[in-house]
Image (tube, helix red, strand yellow):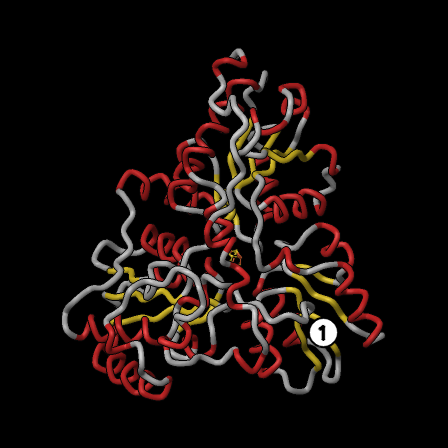
Amino acid sequence: MKTPLQLNSSTNKKPTLPLAEIEHSAFCKTEDELPARPLLDELKVNIRWQEIPVEYLRLTVEDLDRRIVRARSSLGDRLMILGHHYQRDEVIKYADVRGDSYLLSKLAAANSKADYVVFCGVHFMAETARVLASDHQTIILPNITAGCSMADMAPTNDVLDAWDDLTGILEDQSIVPVTYMNSTAEIKALCGRNGGIVCTSSNAEGVFKWAFQRAKRILFLPDQHLGRNTGLKMGIPEESMIVWNPFKRMGGHSEEEYNKASVILWRGHCAVHTRFTVGQIEMARQRFPDLRVIVHPECTREVVDASDINGSTEVIRREIEQAASGSSWAVGTEISLVNRLAKENPDKNIFCLDPVVCPCSTMYRIHPAYLAWVLEGLVEGVVVNEINVEPEIAEHARIALETMLSV
Ligand code: SF4
């Protein structure tokens, strides 16, 4: 067993938030302001944007539309565009396939015909597609600053330190690392290297069962809320789930507490889904007595408990599509998806739980100007923003992803 002096996370660190988290509310606006404007106007929002050739800055959405359609048709079957459900309308309309991160990555791997896969999502999704796709395929993220604040909350060195410390202090050495899809390829690789696995919000329960067949406890990365909500669904008492705080010495708990825990939750969260509150649910229920409330399991435990249904984006879509005409739904997930569900289901009353309109600020960086830029580059034979993963990282990340597929 390690002495405290040998611990990697032996000192308290100054808490720092990932930049994407700080920038999160930059795009909170009214419904009227949500439609895309020329990129030059949107650049006034004070966040990190990737530099782009100046000719794209002033193009209207209509001009960009013509150029994207032309480039897309010239590339034909050599191109596949993937669109995440949280993407804005002016971008997702070009997607050959829409879905959540897992479905899209699987599709990228299954379609080996396309030489170029343009992923209109965020960085970890494009990395996952890179890990699963064939060698001859080129994966492109239109705006390289489209990251994910949750994935950024689990930096590799902090997680490696925590893993070393935990394996050093656990008397029975019985622990499996499990990471949510929303994590970097390096974190997925850490799981693959250590007998662990990846999960999505759709299969988290099955993955927990798999992990508990192999060890007494799980280190769950990086979303504490999905981890806690999944544990609770499986009947694990809340007191058996403790949070590893990377800013505190040894994660903020004693050796004894880690030895007793069943689930060690990384202290990460989604800035979009933790905006929802029980107060918003109560207010919505007062307005519509027969209301159904459906939320994503990245929301807090209290919000999930106060809702009627919780599930992945695919579950939310399915439940609403199959609901009775005339029913009312308050939805706790990303606003672009909620607005699209409302448009696609005009016979139902669908609205976002949060009255303030806040899209996922990192997804929102994929402006149509970036899509036009990367597609026109491909037509000219120039690859812009290719996503690569080091071979050793890709190999172990693939093991963790393929283990998930076998569950
Ligand atoms: S919605 Fe949350 S978890 Fe999803 S990409 Fe945006 S910040 Fe990341």
In the rendered image, the vertical position of residue 295 relative to residue 80, given as above or below: above
Q: Which residue is mark 1?
A: 329
Taking the image as shown, residue 407 lies to the left or right of residue 311, namely left
Taking the image as shown, residue 372 lies to the left or right of residue 181, namely left
Taking the image as shown, residue 292 lies to the left or right of residue 372, namely right
How far across and down, in percent of the image, does residue 71 sit?
A: 24, 80
How far across and down, in percent of the image, does residue 341 sit?
A: 59, 77
Question: Crowding at label 1, few (<14), some or many (≥20) Cα neighbours within 10 Å?
Answer: many
Camera-nearest residue between 54 and 308: 54
How far across and down, in percent of the image, does residue 10 sit?
A: 51, 21
How far across and down, in percent of the image, does residue 153 sit?
A: 50, 44
Q: What residue occupies the far left of the structure in this picture?
A: 381
In the rendered image, the vertical position of residue 66 relative to residue 2, given as above or below: below
SS for dot 1 = strand
Q: Residue at x 40, y 33 (%)?
A: 193
Camera-nearest residue between 354 and 324: 354
Q: Residue at x 57, y 38 (%)?
A: 266
